[in-house]
Amino acid sequence: MSEASDAVTADRALKARHRAMWAMGDYPSVASHVIPDAGAELVAECGVRRGDRVLDVAAGAGNAAIPAALAGADVVASDLTPELLEIGRHKAGVRGAELDWREADAEQLPFADGEFDVVMSCFGVMFAPHHRAAADELVRVCRPGGTVGLANWTPEGFVGRMFATMKPFAPPAPPGAQPPPLWGDEEHVYELLGDRVTDVEARRRTVRVDAFPGPGEFRTFFKTCYGPTVAVYRSLGDDADRAAALDRALDALAEEETRDGAMEWEYLLLTAHRTAPAAS
C-alpha cells in the first residue's frame, strides 16, 4: 500500500509541475507565431464534419479545437492547464466558436468509452510523460470506426533537436517519463496504438517558420514564451555561465537550421481509425 500511495503522490507532483510549466510564458503566442494553421490542417485531415463529437486532448488554447467547432462539430477541448483553457475561451468567443472547455489529464481522461467520433491532439499529447497511458486513453474514448488524429514534432526535426539541445541543461526526467518527440517517430506511435487502430496514415510534413529575423530573436522569444524552455532556464537559477552556454547552444541550432531567413520544422501527421473491440 505504501508503494502505491507513493506512486500516486509522485504522479500528482509530476502533473503539478507540468501544469505549472505550461502556465509559464505565453504558449498561445507560440502557437500563433509558429503553427497558426496546424490546428485547422489537423481538423481537415481528421475529416471533421458538422455534428461530429470531437475531443481535443491537451488542447492548449484551442488551436485545433476552435477550428473544429467552427466546422460545426460538437467539441470538447481538454487540457491539464486551466490558464490555457481560459485564454482559449476568450479566443473562441472572439471567433464566434462554441465549445466546452474541460480541465483534464491526458493520461486519465474523464470521458466514457467510445464517447467521441474524433479524438485529436495538435502538439499536445506528446508532452504527457507516460506515453502508453496517454495512447490508451486516446483509443479508449474514440468510438469504433472513429478517427484518432495526431500532429507531433519529430525527434529529427527542429523541435526534437531543440529538446535534445536543452536536455544537458535540464533537471533529470522523472522515472518512467518519456521524451515528448518520440511521439513524432512512426514506429513508436504504431507500437503505442497497436492493433486497436487500422487504416493508419503517417506523413512527415514541415511548417515554415519565418517569424524570427535571426537566431537571437528566436531564442529570446522561446525563453520568454515557451513553457519547456522557460522551465529549463529557471532551473539554472543564478548560474549565469550555464545560462549563457544554453543561449549559445540554442543560437547555434537556430543558425544551422535557418535558410533564406526561415526554418522548416518537421512534424508527423498521423490519422487512424479505431477498430471494434474484440468480442468477449
Image (cartoon, rainbow, N blue to C red):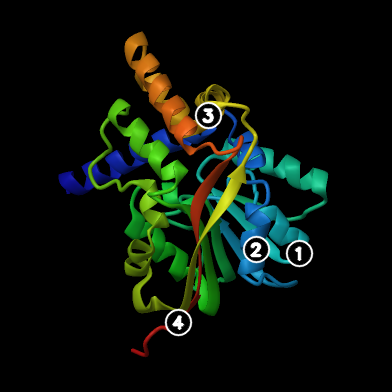
Residue 220 in view of the camera? yes
The x, y position of residue 22, in whole percent, is 50, 35
Secondary element under disc 3, as helix, strand or loop, is: helix
Mark 1 Cα shell of 10 Å, populated few (<14), some (14-19), many (≥20): some
What residue sits right under mark 2 in the picture?
Answer: 43
Residue at point 74%, 40% (across, down): 90
Amino acid type for the residue under numbered disc 3: Phe
Q: Name the front one of labels 3 and 4.
A: 3
Front position among marks 2 and 4? 2
CA distance separating discs 1 and 3: 31 Å
Question: Looking at the picture, how far across and down is residue 58, in whole percent?
Answer: 52, 50
Position in image of residue 13 (x %, y %): 34, 36
Q: CA distance from mark 4 to mark 1?
A: 25 Å
Residue at numbered disc 4: 275
Is label 1 or label 3 in front? 3
Which element type, helix, strand or loop, lies under badge 4? Answer: loop
Q: How far is disc 2 from disc 4 in space, using C-alphas? A: 20 Å
The local crowd at label 3, few if under 14, some if 14 to 19, many if 20 or more residues have their Cα within 10 Å, is some
109 is higher (above) or lower (below) than 198: above
Q: Residue at x 25, y 47 (%)?
A: 176
In contact (CB < 8 Å): disc 2 and disc 1: yes
Residue placed under numbered mark 3 in the picture: 222
- Label 1: which residue? 71
Disc 2 to disc 3, how far (Cα)?
26 Å
Which of disc 4 and disc 3 is earlier in sequence? 3
| Residue at the outermost left position | 2
Look at 33% across and 11% down and name the residue there: 241
Identify the residue at horizontal 32%, vertical 68% (top origin): 191
Q: Residue furthest bottom?
A: 279
